[in-house]
């Protein structure tokens, strides 16, 4: 959100929390012909967004989307825990229902780094 506040919002908008959204970033970058949804890393970043929302809020739209796009996160050690994978998310903060391992974290870190590289390249092309 720091990038949004410092680089994309006008000085009168910087304190408007209603603008601190993923959609606002996409919209503002779109004004300079940068479509971040076309970045190679975008699917992994969307997965990360749904993962974070699922962990914070439990069952809901994000956990449903996460089950569709990343069912492996509902498995223990790469295999089902003995229960059918239902996507039910009750207590993710207690280490249940969603299972993230160090390899997953590495993938998300890589996607975040790639995002900033792709954004820099896209902005340089438009300059």
Image: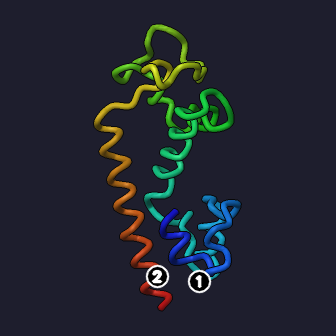
Mark 2 crowd level (few <14, some 14–19, many ≥20, 10 Å Cα): few
Give residue 11's quadrant in the image: bottom right
- Residue occupied by mark 2: 123
N-terminal of the pair, mark 1 or mark 2, is 1
Left or right, 91 with reference to 111? right
Left or right, 57 with reference to 2? right
Residue 1 x/y as whole percent: 52, 62
Left or right, 81 with reference to 60? left
Q: Nearer the viewer, residue 57 or 69?
A: 57
Residue for point 51% across, 40% down: 52
Provide the secondary structure element on which disc 2 rests: helix
CB atoms of marks 1 and 2 within 8 Å = yes
User: In the displayed structure, would residue 122 be above or below residue 4?
Assistant: below
Residue for point 47% across, 91% down: 127
Q: Nearer the viewer, residue 81 or 52?
A: 52
Residue 104 x/y as whole percent: 35, 39
Residue 51 x/y as whole percent: 51, 38
Mark 1 crowd level (few <14, some 14–19, many ≥20, 10 Å Cα): few
Numbered circles on residues, count:
2
Disc assigned to residue 32: 1
């Amino acid at each position: 959100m720091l990038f949004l506040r410092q680089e994309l919002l006008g000085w009168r908008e910087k304190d408007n929390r209603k603008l601190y959204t993923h959609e606002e970033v996409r919209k503002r970058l779109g004004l300079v012909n940068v479509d971040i949804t076309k970045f190679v890393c975008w699917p992994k970043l969307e997965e990360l967004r749904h993962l974070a929302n699922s962990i914070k809020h439990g069952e809901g739209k994000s956990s449903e989307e996460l089950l569709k796009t990343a069912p492996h996160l509902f498995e223990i050690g790469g295999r089902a825990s003995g229960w059918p994978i239902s996507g039910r998310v009750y207590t993710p903060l207690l280490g249940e229902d969603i299972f993230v391992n160090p390899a997953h974290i590495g993938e998300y870190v890589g996607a975040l780094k790639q995002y900033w590289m792709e954004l820099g390249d896209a902005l340089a092309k438009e300059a």
